[in-house]
Amino acid sequence: MRPPAPFPWAKPRRERLLLALVVVAALTPVYVVSTQDVSHFCLTRALAAGKFAIAPCGKYSVDIASYGGHIYSNKAPGMSALALPAVEAVGLPSALRWPAGGDLQLWLVRALTSGVAFLACAFLVGRVAEGLVAGSGGAVLVTFGLGTFVTPFAASGFDHVPTAALSFAAFVLAWSRRPSLAGVAAGLAYAVEYEAAAVLLLVAVYVALHGRGPFGRYVAGAAPAVLLSAAYSWLAFGAPWRIPQHYDVYSFPDVKPGGILGVHAPTFKSIRLVFVGDRGLLVATPVVLAAAIGLGLLWRRGFRAESLLCAAVTAVFVVGECGYGDPYGGLSAGPRYLIPALPFLALGLAPAFKRWRIPTALLSAASIVATIALTLTWARSAGKHYRETVWGEIGRTTWHPSGSRLIGELAKNVVDSAGVSRVSAAGMVCACAVFAYALALRQR
């Protein structure tokens, strides 16, 4: 048994203002209805009615499973369950169809589920980073919130951001010696996205380092959500160990059946797309290099178990992403399956900003520029390549604006209803991002 490293927790300067700016920049885009929305929120409607089958609502999605003559969502049930209060309070469009234009009701449901999770995750990352290195919390908060692939999915109906928030909360709670609550968060993360089983197990190992008692409380905390997820599988698919993906109705050319949740050994094609594709990690979010090196600095500062856990979570999700036949997950802003690992990786930015302030700041700025560009356009450009990568499209806004997808395919924004043009709304998003980043860098 080892004593845990001191739990770092401090409030960055101007935290509320930074969070407000990040929220406006990330959450105001109104995306078109996606097949993920239909799959998740049709199940929400079904759960509200005491059912599991999602037909006829779900017939407009390709993310569906078929069993026993019924149509189900092919997702874990947790995201749909978390959306129940929002859907009951706000409602949904009567015809939830994919593809279709953006809808403000659907946007509000997304904001109250993924959006709230995004805000909570950015808050946790900023607080822990400030506790690790005084003066770094604001920069890390803004970089994580506006310069990683968390950003374009913050206002979407995908389940990756809630999974990231719950997974990271499990780690933070375990680090702060609250194993029961850590188990609850990890169990909920698994119920939202089955891939979070990796986090559930890795955090369990971390908790076990502190003794049998904390480990037992962690397991007890995780059990209810895991058992409820198993009960859903039993009632819908006939056995608690069956998962919806085993009964997918649609198959995709690049995705091989079998493996672990469709993940096989990494391939060269997937590795290339994940890292250097037109919206790959190193192309759109080069700040991850500084974050990865920064985890090594955390190890040297004495946070050995914690940095190792962050590195392990990151490695598992990156390898899994590289082993999936379709790393961008169809109509997507980038390699989205690794999003749950990003808050863990972001903690490496705290010592990186202290040790290599200027290089880290430059990588962060580049990541924010590219990620905001993706955030503003991916929903309408999805399925198309960004010519000469997303940076090629950014360049076109300077020398050939009418030919750039960053101008021609801007997403709607909540301020559109007030008569603001899409270009002006995009300018508001960019201004909030610039102001937040400039303010964060002045905190030292």
Image (tube, rainbow, N blue to C red):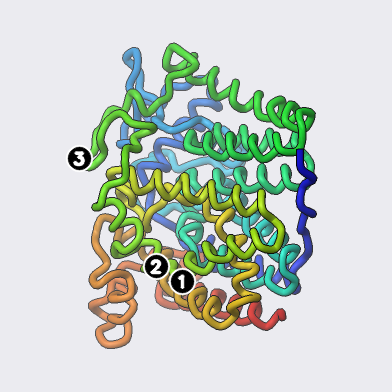
Q: Nearer the viewer, residue 120 or 215?
A: 215
Q: Nearer the viewer, residue 293 or 18?
A: 293
- Which residue sits at x=33%, y=43%? 323
Tell me: residue 40, above or below residue 292.
Answer: above
SS state under label 3: loop
Q: Which residue is mark 2?
A: 284
Location of the C terminus by quadrant is bottom right
Residue 436, image x and y in percent?
61, 76
Q: Is residue 419 visible?
A: no
Q: CA distance from mark 3 to mark 2?
A: 26 Å
Residue located at (34% from left, 56% from top): 274
Percent across and percent down for residue 278 are: 29, 65
Which residue is pictured at 65% across the width and 24% down the height? 223
SS for callout 1: helix
Left or right of 42? Residue 225 is right
Q: Nearer the viewer, residue 97 or 164?
A: 164
Q: Which residue is disc 3 drawn over?
A: 253
Q: Quadrant of the N terminus?
A: top right
Separation of disc 1 and disc 3 at Cα? 31 Å
Give the amino acid at mark 1: Ser
Looking at numbered disc 2 in the image, what kind of residue is underneath it? Ala
Would residue 198 be visible to someone looking at this image?
Answer: yes
Residue 354, percent across and down?
65, 75
Q: Amino acid at mark 3?
A: Pro
Residue denoted by label 1:
367
